[in-house]
Amino acid sequence: MSANSLVISPSILAADFSRLGEEVRDVVQAGADWIHMDVMDGHFVPNITIGPDVLKGLRRWTDRPFDVHLMISPVDLYLEAFAKAGADLITAHMEAGPHIHRTLQAIRALGKKVGVTLNPGTSVSLLEPVIGMVDLVLVMSVNPGFGGQAFIPEAVDRVRAIRAMARGKALRIEVDGGVGAENAGLLAAAGADTFVAGSAVFKGGASVYAANIEAIRAAARQGAKAATLPELPVEA
């Protein structure tokens, strides 16, 4: 895996919502590869965030890929709305409904890249039947629902297990929750190549976004030297 295949995807959950478009512009100018959007419904997770209309409004601020993480249930009803609003990659939870296979098929049919994720307490073995259907597996390193939580160290072993399960498939492994320069290296060494960072990017304001992103990227680059992974494009 080359350093160029590493992706930093700042989570706008940690951005200033009073100037969200400008925040997207600023992190892109600071070096963000993707933009991560956490969508929460107050039902599947104990918080409510944003919907497809916000994504549609933000789409004009950048041509970088929007990495949309749906923490909602039921999820299938809203896939088309997020696809039409400008999502490039849509990630659904294993736990969000009884028919994850159908959900992943539906995302692909909408012409979008396909992601699947599971909560920290859900066994990674459940990915086995669907891992061949997806472009990305998102490892939650916190319990979903709130930003700013502490990183769960067991996520490193979960990344390693999923990378082994992929058996050489060109699969992105993304990690979301408490990710920063202090753990990006460990995650990259285990096989992660895509890093969602909220507070670690947005802390300190726009003047330090570039430095924050570069610190995470540099740590991941060092960790990636210990891993031998298939070359992946940065595009979603």
Image (cartoon, grey):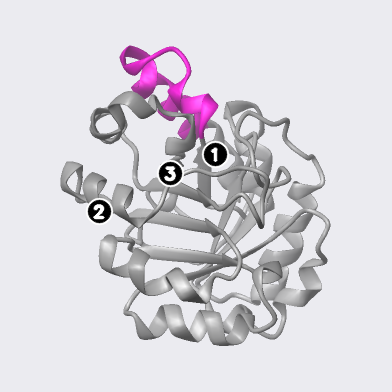
Q: Is residue 184 magenta?
A: no
Q: Could you tell which of marks 2 and 3 lies nearer the N-terminus?
A: 3
Disc 1 marks which amino acid?
Ala
Tell which circle, 1 or 2, labels the residue nearer the N-terminal end: 2
Question: Badge 2 local density, few (<14 within 10 Å), some, or many (20+)?
Answer: some
Please tell me the numbered disc located at residue 8. Answer: none
Q: What is the x, y in percent for residue 157?
A: 79, 53
Q: Which residues are magenta?
A: 198-218
Is residue 190 found left or right of 116 in the rendered image? right
The residue under label 1 is 220
The numbered mark, 3 or 1, whose residue comes first in the sequence reads: 3
Residue tagged by mark 2?
Answer: 56
Left or right, 1 with reference to 95: left
Measure the C-alpha gap from mark 1 to mark 2: 31 Å
Q: Element at badge 1?
A: helix
Residue identifier under label 3: 9
Q: Residues within 10 Å of mark 1 (few under 14, many from 20)?
A: many
Q: Considering depth in this image, is 16 or 104 the residue closer to the camera?
A: 16
Q: Main secondary structure of the magenta part?
A: helix
